[in-house]
């Protein structure tokens, strides 16, 4: 609180000071807010994409391990077509009594697909005639009842014409069934097919009965229906051979990596860049000034790092793959600090000046401190096989979406002539990084496949939030090894081809 | 709109609420940023950066004090960080230990307008300007200022005393010249 009038007046006047900002300021603020929203959306998208990919691979994996659908269908019990013939004739004949019988002289025309009666739609030619359906030879007396129906209204004739068309359709099917059966018999003889795709017994039996039926001049309704039913049976029990597609197979496995991490002021530094100051407050102009505003922080050194996790490889083709998974990452770097002390100090790098730090490390001293970073990330990488042979060389490149869930890293501040303290909110939690690497693959095609090779990962997200430092990125280099358990069904397919 | 509801809507990411919050405090905050910088353009940069931080960390506001006071602290910190990051300000932000500082008993009244006073304060050397703003206007103690700037409280006191003397001299001169011009106009 100001004690003197001067300070009171100054404070009062300054609080009244209001200046109108230009409209550009709000637009820039808005743009920053939208950027952050977009980053959040992108993060959620990548997480969902990663989860979707993992779920899809799991679904494909479980789908491939199920029994073949055609095997199940083929193994279902089906009635003997010869038996079915008798059954159908019994079921149809009651209908034939009422409506479906016709004089014998029109039977042949009815059976002929090219006949006018067969194709008639207007019904003029067939007006006054019965629907074109084969009749049961045992039901000749039905013709009288049919003649009676000729006297009925036009609606009845329309109904009859509809039935004619249906019947003609069934005739067509019967003829087609003949052809199908013939073709299938020929195919069976030429290309023996495994039991998984067809039931040859059923096919040959159906074909036999059909060929018998087709050789007859007249087609009784029961035989026609049998033919139609055979077509249905055949299509159900003998799935049409589809063009063989290459299935995308998924290989699951584990991966591990060991290497070093450095903290650098550029996204793509060399690991041999040397030590870099880890704070933007450092400027050469104020190195030696006594009592200067700026105190040098400790430079950082590389620290050990390792990664381990589950991995999945989606084989798009023989040489192109997608790698994904979920990986735990430990990274570290080292700084030199001074003595540790308990204190209550207000730091000015925090968002709010009420941020009080309870423990501090002095900036100068001989103690080594290791900053550790623990994160989980989901990699999404494209891999391409570059060479063939026993030890194919693969190259991969991709992005990683990670979450820094724990860290003990220290943040530098100018308070008390330079200190280090812990502030978890100083670090960005969500990290995007890019990685690339090479590996040599080896192992038997039917068994486990190994790969090993160098990889590097560069963080595209700044390590610290803006108030602290703009340019600090983690950079990892190491050797990565993967063990993949190849898909068994793919192995069986490959063996079958051989 | 009620302040609590406004904060809630801002936390939900509603742009109209965020704009309303900005419009409510922007003019006052620009005045604060103006006092720490040399130009209105730099002041607007600080204002923009400060409001981005406000929206980003609005979840940390616990409704324990006024929202304006909370935003004000963020603006002051943003201004200080801005000064630390830019070379043109760093070169002037130089504090030396003062073992003897002038003692003054002057306590004049300030009869200038806010903008005039702010312009005079901005003419102080950068280090003086920062300490004067932090102590006289924001109300920080010299111990707190020392910790914020990495200097001793003694340095803060002496720097402030020098700044105060300088400013009083300028205010008196400015007042005299203003009176002369007023009478000349008449």
Image (cartoon, rainbow, N blue to C red):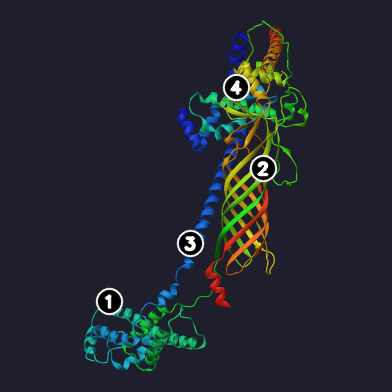
How far apart are the two marked residues, 2 and 3, measured between alpha carbons?
38 Å
* Place of residue A366 in the rendered image (x, y in percent of width and height, measured from the top left): 70, 32
Q: Which residue is mark 3?
A: A59
Nearest to the eye among marks 3 and 1: give it: 3
Question: Which numbered disc flags the more N-terminal residue, 2 or 4?
Answer: 4
Residues behind callouts 1 and 4 on a single chain: yes
Q: Is residue A113 visible?
A: no
Residues behind callouts 1 and 2 on a single chain: yes
SS class of the residue under badge 1?
A: helix
How far apart are the two marked residues, 1 and 4, measured between alpha carbons?
91 Å
Which image quarter holds the C terminus of chain B? top right
Give whichever of A220, A279 is nearer the camera.
A279
SS class of the residue under badge 4?
A: loop
Give whichever of A93, A279 is nearer the camera.
A279
Which disc is residue A18 wearing?
4
Q: Quadrant of residue B129?
A: top right
Q: Which residue is mark 1?
A: A155
Question: Which numbered disc flags the more N-terminal residue, 3 or 1?
Answer: 3
Residue B134 relative to residue A64: left or right = right
How far apart are the two marked residues, 1 and 2, measured between alpha carbons?
85 Å
In this view, A366 is above or below A122: above
The chain to which mark 1 is attached is A
Question: Which numbered disc flags the more N-terminal residue, 1 or 2?
Answer: 1
Question: Which numbered disc flags the more N-terminal residue, 2 or 3?
Answer: 3
Which disc is residue B92 wearing?
none
How far apart are the two marked residues, 2 and 4, measured between alpha carbons?
40 Å
The chain to which mark 4 is attached is A
* Place of residue A190 in the rendered image (x, y in percent of width and height, measured from the top left): 52, 88
């Amino acid at each position: 609180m100001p004690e003197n009038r001067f300070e009171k007046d100054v404070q009062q006047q300054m609080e009244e000071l209001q200046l109108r900002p230009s409209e550009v300021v709000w637009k820039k603020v808005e743009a920053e807010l939208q950027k952050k929203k977009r980053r959040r959306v992108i993060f959620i998208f990548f997480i969902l994409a990663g989860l979707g990919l993992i779920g899809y691979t799991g679904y494909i994996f479980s789908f491939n391990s199920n029994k073949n659908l055609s095997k199940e269908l083929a193994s279902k019990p089906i009635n003997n077509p010869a038996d079915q013939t008798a059954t159908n004739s019994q079921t149809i004949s009651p209908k034939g009594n009422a409506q479906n019988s016709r004089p014998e002289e029109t039977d042949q025309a009815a059976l002929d697909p090219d006949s006018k009666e067969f194709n008639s739609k207007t019904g003029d030619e067939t007006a006054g005639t019965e629907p074109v359906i084969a009749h049961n030879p045992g039901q000749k007396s039905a013709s009288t009842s049919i003649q009676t129906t000729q006297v009925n209204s036009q609606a009845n004739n329309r109904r009859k014409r509809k039935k004619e068309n249906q019947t003609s359709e069934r005739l067509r099917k019967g003829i087609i069934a003949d052809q199908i059966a013939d073709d299938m018999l020929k195919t069976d003889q030429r290309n023996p097919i495994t039991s998984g795709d067809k039931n040859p017994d059923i096919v040959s039996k159906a074909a036999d009965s059909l060929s018998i039926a087709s050789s007859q001049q007249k087609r009784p309704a029961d035989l026609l229906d049998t033919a139609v039913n055979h077509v249905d049976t055949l299509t159900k029990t003998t799935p049409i051979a589809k063009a063989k597609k290459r299935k995308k197979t998924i290989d699951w496995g584990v991966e591990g990596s060991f290497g070093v991490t450095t903290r650098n002021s550029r996204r793509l530094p060399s690991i041999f860049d040397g030590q870099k100051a880890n704070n933007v407050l450092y400027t050469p102009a104020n190195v030696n000034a006594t009592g200067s505003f700026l105190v040098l922080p400790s430079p950082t050194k590389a620290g050990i790092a390792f990664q381990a996790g589950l991995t999945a490889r989606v084989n798009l083709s023989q040489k192109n793959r997608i790698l994904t998974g979920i990986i735990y990452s430990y990274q570290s770097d080292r700084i030199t600090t001074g003595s540790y002390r308990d204190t209550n100090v207000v730091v000015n790098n925090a968002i709010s000046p009420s941020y009080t730090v309870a423990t501090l490390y002095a900036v100068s001293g001989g103690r080594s401190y290791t900053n550790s970073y623990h994160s989980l990330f989901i990699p999404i990488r494209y891999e391409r096989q570059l060479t063939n042979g026993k030890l194919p060389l693969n190259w991969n490149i991709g992005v990683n979406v990670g979450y820094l869930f724990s860290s003990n890293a220290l943040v530098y501040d100018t308070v008390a002539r330079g200190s280090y303290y812990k502030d978890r909110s100083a670090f960005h939690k969500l990290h995007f990084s890019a990685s690339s690497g090479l590996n040599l693959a080896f192992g038997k095609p039917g068994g486990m496949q190994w790969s090993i090779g160098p990889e590097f990962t560069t963080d595209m997200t700044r390590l610290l939030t803006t108030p602290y430092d703009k340019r600090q990125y983690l950079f990892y280099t190491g050797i990565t090894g993967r063990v993949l358990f190849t898909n068994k069904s793919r192995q069986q397919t490959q063996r079958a081809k051989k | 709109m009620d302040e609590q509801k406004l904060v809630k809507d801002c936390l939900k990411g509603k742009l109209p609420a965020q704009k309303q919050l900005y419009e409510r405090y922007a003019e006052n905050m620009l005045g604060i940023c103006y006092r720490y910088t040399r130009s209105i353009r730099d002041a607007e940069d600080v204002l923009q950066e400060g409001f981005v931080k406000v929206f980003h960390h609005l979840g940390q506001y616990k409704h324990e004090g006024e929202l304006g006071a909370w935003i004000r602290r963020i603006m002051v910190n943003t201004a200080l960080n801005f000064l630390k990051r830019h070379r043109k300000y760093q070169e002037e932000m130089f504090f030396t230990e003062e073992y003897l500082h002038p003692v003054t008993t002057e306590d004049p009244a300030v009869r200038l307008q806010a903008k005039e006073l702010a312009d005079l304060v901005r003419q102080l050397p950068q280090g003086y300007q920062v300490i004067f703003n932090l102590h006289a206007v924001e109300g920080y103690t010299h111990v707190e200022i020392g910790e914020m700037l990495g200097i001793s409280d003694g340095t803060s006191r002496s720097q402030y005393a020098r700044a105060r003397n300088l400013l009083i001299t300028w205010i008196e001169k400015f007042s005299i010249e203003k009176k002369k011009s007023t009478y000349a106009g008449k």
